[in-house]
Image (cartoon, grey):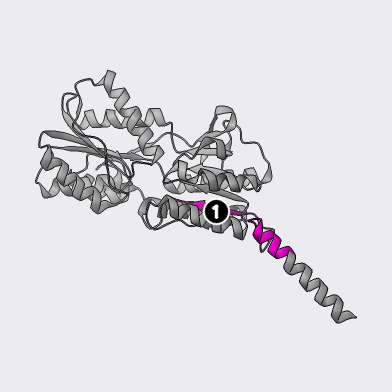
Amino acid sequence: MKKGLYLVLVVLLMATGTALWASGVQEKESDVPTVLIMPKLIGIPYFNASERGALQAGKDLGIKVIYNGPTECDAAAQVKMIEDYISRGVDAIAVAPNDAAALTPVLKKARNLGIKVLDWDTPADRSVVDISVHQIDDVEYGRHIWDLLVKHMGTDDADYGIITGGLEAANLNAWIDYGIEYAKTKYPRLNLVTERIPTNEKQEEAYSKSLSMLKAYPSIKGIVAMSSPAPIGAGQAIEELGRVGKIAVVGTGLPTDSCPYLTSGAISEVTLWNPATLGYLAVYLAHELILGNEIVDGMDVPTVGKISVRDGGSTVVMGPPEDYNKGNCATFDF
């Protein structure tokens, strides 16, 4: 009798597990909240720094943080990984999409299953996220980079080029678009010699494509380099061509990686924020959503500071950017 009852219970448990798996959600191993933080890719310094911040937030909050992403800028790989983590059971997903549109169906699925969905570093489709976590004000940031370009070229009457990470990266495109639009009125004599050139978040591609661009357009006096590996690759190309001091390179970059090229003059100045702080903020906000807490303007986040909340609570802006140059780059640890 007892043996028969035991077998019935086993069959019922197996059936329940199968039903959960079929619905796309597997039972979690524990009641501790689990947050998935997915970067565009793993293995580059910027996202390595973000990982440190995210994992520290997990320790501080007493929750489980999974930091994982593809090894290449591949939206399809992100979709596949998110599907897998939905099946395993997570409470929140914060992703930096390689292609926002490609991730919309899987993020919609996650949200429909009750998982909190955020984007960070790079915007996703606004209709499928609970909160969009921005590093800075996009308009101000794009304008600031073009101001740096003119400052370091020493003229607003010059040819320049743009290299970027990926052509589908919404954050990079936004900064470039705002910068170009700003230049039309503020610096009308600036001449962009060619369309923005993608480098797929790879330093070696930024180097080779900068080299090709400078050979094709020898009149260039400045390069806007978007994504943290891009200024370094551009600086390498300028050093190889013996044009240090003749071409200004500005853009988004980490101070430690850029420092040798900032010191040599191959890179003029880069601007960014602390990516570890951004990783921390993404985890903190995901946890607040899991708890059902309201996220309000001026909220003081530990290790981050006061945040700006906009668009009826759907957008969070971390704060203003920092500029890194040969005078201060050695003082940072990221």
Residue identified by numbered label 1: 36
Residue shown at 23% from the left, 50% from the top: 260
Which residue extends farthest top?
185
Front one among 295 and 192: 192
Q: Quadrant of residue 171?
A: top left
Is 235 part of what is drawn in magenta? no
Q: Is residue 29 above or below residue 215?
A: below
Q: Position of residue 75 (x, y in %)?
A: 43, 50
Front one among 293 and 325: 293
Q: Is residue 36 left or right of residue 165?
A: right
Q: Quadrant of residue 28?
A: bottom right
Is 29 part of what is drawn in magenta? yes
Q: Position of residue 121 (x, y in %)?
A: 44, 42
Q: How many numbered circles does the render carry?
A: 1
Q: Position of residue 202 (x, y in %)?
A: 29, 52
Residue shown at 12% from the left, 40% from the top: 216
Instruction: State the extent of the magenta-drawn residues as a range.
Output: 16-40
Q: Is residue 220 left or right of residue 232?
A: left
Circle 1: element type: strand
Q: Say if residue 303 shows up in the picture.
A: no
In which quadrant is the N terminus drawn? bottom right
Q: Say if residue 135 shows up in the picture.
A: yes
Front one among 121 and 295: 121
Q: Is residue 183 above or below residue 193?
A: above
Residue shown at 14% from the left, 41% from the top: 214
Q: Position of residue 263 (x, y in %)?
A: 21, 46
Q: Is residue 33 left or right of residue 140?
A: right
Which residue type carries mark 1?
Leu
Q: Residues within 10 Å of mark 1 (few under 14, many from 20)?
A: many
Q: Is residue 186 above or below residue 278?
A: above
